[in-house]
Amino acid sequence: MFRASTNTRRRVAAAVLVVAPLVAVTSSGQIATARTETQREPNVAISASPQRLDLLPRPCIPTLLTVGFHNRSGQSAYATAFIRTMSPVRVSDEVVTTYVPPDYAATAPVEVRVPGDTPPGEYPIHLDAGRKRVTVPVVVSAEPDDPNRNLALGQETTASSTGGVLDPCGAVDGNRTYTLLGYNRPATAWADATPSGFPDQVQTTLAKPAQIGRVDLYTHADRRFALRDWDVQALTEAGWQTVAQVRGHTAGRYSSSFTPVTASAVRINMLATNGYAYSTLVELEIYQQ
């Protein structure tokens, strides 16, 4: 049997020791390069417009923030922005992802709103995309000190049910005309989703308890689709109480005046229409007197 001499074995071992580090260095370098290419972030800039949001505490009337992505590289990329807010600010989306072709700018809309009882002040919104951050201050102002103002405008509004293209917020958006949802156009009214099933209800919560003495209701301007019978109810310290009743109405606006009460919410309890299967409410307005 052939046996290598001690010197031969040492030379082979030395050769292995010399070659192995070269292989290791080469492999390590290749892996490092591959990882660098895989983990390299796309060159996408993030922006926000406007750079400052000024809004009133009207949760049913959101303010629009446009998140922008600008791909400055030569390769397509998927860009993601994480949106972080400070309470009580609410956003419609906490994560926004969009495809951005090379040298192209893409945008994504985000609705921003605050509850009706939000104190005046500044609340930041942070947009994070990779290592990039954009901060947008949200400046909330107090409602105008006007005794004649509509207390329902933009306030939190819910309904017993809602027809597909409508929204309860459409009944407190300040628009007294009946408009359905359309391209880049919000619905400006509410209708229920239970045909010929009564009662139907819409409830608006005030920003804070207030004395109220009048409720104006705008139903459809066409009698065929208008409300006929309903009760106006106020949430007081004693619970819900009916402060006004309307029977035999035909179409359009009806104003209910009553002995003032201190209420935290108002509810319209709809009992009948003029023949249409659905209750329709175009606008609900609440006043002190």
Image: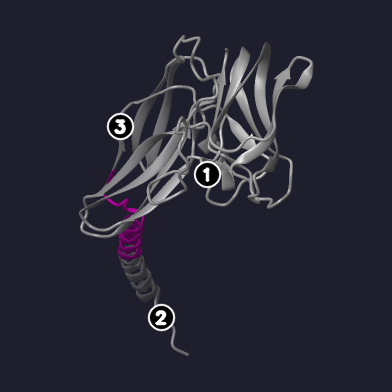
Q: Which residue is mark 3?
A: 50
Q: Looking at the rendered structure, which numbered label has been put on residue 123?
A: none
Q: Which residue is mark 2?
A: 4
| Label 3: element kind | loop
| Label 2: element kind | loop
- Residue at 63% from the left image edge and 39% from the top image edge: 227
Image quarter of residue 47: top left
- Given residues 250 and 56, the one toward you in this image is 250
Q: Which region is colored magenta? A: 24-45
Q: Which residue is mark 1?
A: 222
Question: What crowding class fits label 2: few (fewer than 14 Cα within 10 Å), some (14-19), or many (20 or more)?
Answer: few
For discs 3 and 1, the disc positioned in front in the rendered view? 1
For discs 2 and 3, the disc positioned in front in the rendered view? 3
Under mark 2, the amino acid is: Ala
State if disc 3 and disc 2 touch (CB < 8 Å).
no
Extreme residue in the bottom direction: 1
Extreme residue in the right direction: 238
- Given residues 162 and 225, the one toward you in this image is 225
Main SS of the magenta part reads: helix
| Label 1: element kind | loop
Query: Distance of mark 3 from mark 1, alpha carbons?
Result: 40 Å
Question: What crowding class fits label 1: few (fewer than 14 Cα within 10 Å), some (14-19), or many (20 or more)?
Answer: few
Q: Where does the image place residue 230, in percent across and percent down from the top left? A: 69, 33
Left or right of 83, for residue 240: right
- Residue at 46% from the left image edge and 30% from the top image edge: 174
Question: What crowding class fits label 3: few (fewer than 14 Cα within 10 Å), some (14-19), or many (20 or more)?
Answer: few
State if disc 1 and disc 2 touch (CB < 8 Å).
no
Q: Mark 1 or mark 2, which is nearer the start of the sequence?
A: 2
Query: Distance of mark 2 from mark 3, alpha carbons?
Result: 80 Å
Left or right of 240, for residue 73: left
